[in-house]
Amino acid sequence: MSLPSIPSIMQRMGVVLKTATEAQMESALVEAMNKDLPLAVKHLHRMSHGNLETGGYVRGNEDPNSELGKQLIRICASTILRELAEKHFCHGQTISFVNCCGPIVGPKKPTPLELMKLQIAMQDGTIAHADC
């Protein structure tokens, strides 16, 4: 389960999924990411600050079997968690994801050509890294 604290957070908030507002659901998911995926949240936040300082992209390359790698996978594999992480933890910077644990934070989503090059480089190049 990506966010095991969701049931307790929803209960504490007094929110039932059937009647929850968009804002309540967003708040619950963001709180759960902070609680259940703290290493990934902090890592993505640091990456976004690195990007804001350089004006370019910051690329990560984490071991998929590390605790950080596992948490990054849980955020990046979910469209909504990735979007919420961009909004709440990355100062509006985009998160792209190549290989199994290669987050890229930048001012805009890389083009398909850039993503294809990165995917290939992550598999067979100077930045190649073991797959999951």
Image (spheres, rainbow, N blue to C red):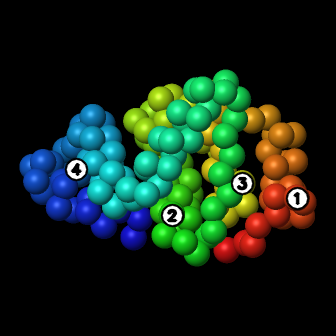
How many residues crowd around disc 1 within 10 Å: few (fewer than 14), some, or many (20 or more)?
few
Please identify the quarter of the rendering in which residue 39 is found: bottom left
Mark on residue 98? 3
Q: Is residue 40 left or right of residue 47?
A: left
Residue pictured at 66% horizontal, 27% vertical: 54
Q: Type of residue at label 4? A: Lys
Q: Is residue 35 above or below residue 87?
A: below
Residue 114 rendering spot, x and y as whole percentages: 83, 40
Mark toward the start of the polypeptide (1 vs 4): 4
Front-lying residue, 20 or 8: 8
How many residues crowd around disc 4 within 10 Å: few (fewer than 14), some, or many (20 or more)?
few
For marks 1 and 4, give the one nearer the viewer.
Answer: 1
Q: Type of residue at label 1? A: Thr
Mark 1 lies on residue:
126
Mark 2 lies on residue:
68
Mark toward the start of the polypeptide (1 vs 3): 3
Q: Is residue 80 visible?
A: no
Front-lying residue, 74 or 53: 53
Residue 88 rendering spot, x and y as whole percentages: 40, 36
Q: Is residue 119 above or below residue 47?
A: below
Q: Type of residue at label 3? A: Val
How many residues crowd around disc 2 within 10 Å: few (fewer than 14), some, or many (20 or more)?
many
Q: CA distance from mark 1 to mark 3?
A: 15 Å
How many residues crowd around disc 3 within 10 Å: few (fewer than 14), some, or many (20 or more)?
many
